[in-house]
Amino acid sequence: MKGSLALWCKKAGDSVDGHSPSLELHFNYWQANTGKKSTDALDMGVLIHDLRVFDEIKIYFPGKIDRKNILDLSSELHDRKTLSAVFNDTLEVGNDHTYCEDEKKKICFQAKSGDTVRFHVMRMNVERDIRIMPIEETDGQEGTLITIENSFLRKFKEIGEHYFRVRFLLDSESLTKLFRDKINPKDQIFSSTFLSLDTLEFRLNERRNFGEKLREEYENGSVPDIRAVHYFLIRDINTELVRAHAEYRKMRKLEPNLWDGYVQRIGDVSPNEMVIYHWRAQASEKSGNVQDFIAYAAFRQPNSLGPIPVASFVIALGSLGSGVFSLFYYLIQRLRSIDPIAVEANKQSFYTSLCATLIALALHVHYIFGQRSCTFLSFCVRSYLERLGHNFGVDFPN
């Protein structure tokens, strides 16, 4: 992972009725289904034990992220099946309450277990309730400081635990690479099917990864007692976990029909084709706090090049063989001083075969390595063919 997420707060006071700031954190990393039009996403849930002792909550994201990439997930949680699935418990959606004059609606609802209110789910207006500030370190590393405003936290007057949940959409390669790296085998160009290694790393409050500006912001605030961190990694079922930094607590296939509403805003996601892995850290009685958290996992994933690159490679080999035969035949005819018309015909045949070989190879490389590699190779191929054509007395077509 490039950097580390961080969380700290600004306290409302030294204490309220002897309470210090404490919370529990939930993270879900959704990796897009293979071959589907979807995006990776990181969900973050914060369970606040006593809202009164918090003045602001600060979240550092280790990359440049826009406000449009941050979504409030309270509407997804306002559903009995989804609420129960997210918390792996039997919960009911209770009464809406806390009327907001600015928004002309109620901005909180109860999560209940039987007649007991377990916690209150807070509805957040991303445009109004959070403040975003970019941070650029001296080494050029970019990050984003997200502040949950005091004006938002003060809206809620109920005694008890409060919960909010947001989603960071990782809809670009630069954002995805903050958490993921894909390693392809060196001989993939010669294989129709190969295994790649996909590594995912998640870090929270890893201070050795903090830049100077982040460290300054972090030390100016207060670190709440993090009682537990739950990290869930959800990815395609057609992969194999080959190594991890620590043993996961639980693994299961996502339940059909429970998650459909929750993942709608990610894209074309098929929960029934995904597996969920669960890691967690809990505060010990001695420390009372999870100071940092890291989860690393590597997956082996099968990849197929598909019919076009395979066919292009076969054509390239066939054309190369034909070209080599034409070249030798051409040289033999020159040595024997055979009919110049036949010599010219073999020269043209060799040049045509070479063109086909290089064009097929360019197509093959395009499907494996992408547009940039193909563009560079096409430039090299054209330059080489123009020079070769000049030597053979053949004009290269525009």
Image (tube, rainbow, N blue to C red):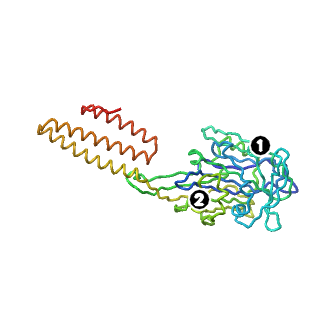
Question: Which residue is disc 2 drawn over?
Answer: 270
- Seen at 68% across and 60% down, the residue is 230
- Seen at 63% across and 42% down, the residue is 64
Residue 362: % across, % down: 38, 43
Question: Which residue is disc 1 drawn over?
Answer: 128
Marks 2,1: beta carbons within 8 A? no
Number of numbered callouts drawn: 2
Element type where label 2 sits in the image: loop
Tell me if residue 266 can be seen: yes
Residue 304: % across, % down: 44, 56
Q: Which of marks 2 and 1 is nearer the N terminus?
A: 1
Q: Is residue 344 left or right of residue 96?
A: left
Which quarter of the rendered picture does the C terminus lie within? top left
- Seen at 69% across and 53% down, the residue is 44
Q: In this view, does 343 lie to the left or right of 141?
A: left
Residue type pointed to by label 1: Arg
Residue 130: % across, % down: 75, 44
Q: In this view, does 361 lie above or below 24?
A: above
Q: In which quarter of the image is residue 77?
A: bottom right
Given residues 310 and 298, the one toward you in this image is: 310
Residue 301: % across, % down: 49, 58
